[in-house]
Image (tube, rainbow, N blue to C red):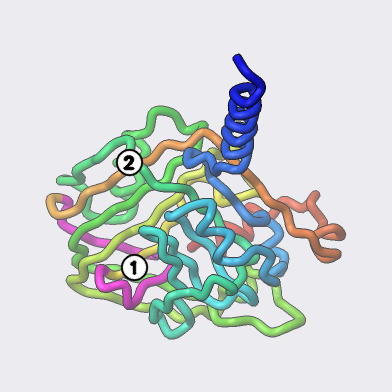
Amino acid sequence: MNKNNNTCLLLLAISLFLSGCCSTNRETVYQVSTIDALLQGLYDGQTTIYTLKRHGDFGLGTFHALDGEMIVLDGRVYQIRADGVAYLADDDDTSPFAAVTFFSADRTLALPTVTDLSGLVTALDNALDTPNIFYAVRVDGHFSYIKTRSVPKQQKPYSPLVEVAKDQPTFEFNNVRGTIIGLRCPRFVKGLNVPEWHFHFITKDRLAGGHLLEVRFEGSEVLAQIDRTSEFHLVLPNSPEFYHLDTDRDLQDELERVEQ
């Protein structure tokens, strides 16, 4: 083999190595910050929406200064503000907390006997291979009733999330088509993310939604897609506030009050 061929092979090997190093693993949950940091009022945006979209096309979170609920669906990032309206987020907007993945269904599940949120959780849990990995779920269909909430934008000095949650606007939808976006984390992520299920909702026309509180539906018109994910990538905030955060506190009670 001549020198030119050797050089070409070397360049090809380097190219393949670099492309492999720089590629994003599509079977990974990519998360910004921790739920405990958010609970303690760390609402300053750390990561751009552009960066989040490079790491996933499906997920949920919130925005700088806690300005609304985030829904990532089909590669678009929606911001459900305190008026209940869904706005397309700009790439240079930032998030203090979010979790995204590239959605690829491993299982499709009809829900003929499910009628409410409790039944939905039970049906999804029964369909899991194991509770010890991450799952993204997309539930599309016609819902007879949906209740959501959102978060008003905060001003400094920020109050803890449990205080903010006491005064959040709620929204009700009747006979609406849309999508429930869910993420299930293993229980051992306590302090990092919400253990077990966390759901957001957006209407089919992508005009409204929020954090899911209640749902009623005819199961025969609803289809769930489940994506199992066993890898997790956590990016911690690079800020003095996070460096001095009290990470020894058990905030599970506060989280449960916020999620209600």
Magenta segment main secondary structure: strand
Residue at 72% across, 77% down:
158
Report whether 74 appears left or right of 234: left
Q: Quadrant of the N terminus?
A: top right
Report whether 90 appears left or right of 31: left
> Where is residue 242 drawn, in percent x and y?
80, 60
The label number, if any, that marks residue 258 in the structure image? none
Q: Residue furthest left?
A: 220
- Check the image and report above or below for 43 versus 118: below
Dot 2: element? loop
**Residue highlighted by disc 1:** 202
**Residue highlighted by disc 2:** 105
Tags 1 and 2 touching, CB below 8 Å? no
Q: Which amino acid lies under the numbered mark 1 shown in the image of this protein?
A: Ile
> Where is residue 185 drawn, in percent x and y?
52, 43
Please name which of the two marks, 1 or 2, marks the residue nearer to the observer. Answer: 2
Q: Which residues, given as a range, are shown in magenta?
A: 204-219
> Where is residue 65 drawn, in percent x and y?
64, 77
Q: Which amino acid lies under the numbered mark 2 shown in the image of this protein?
A: Ala
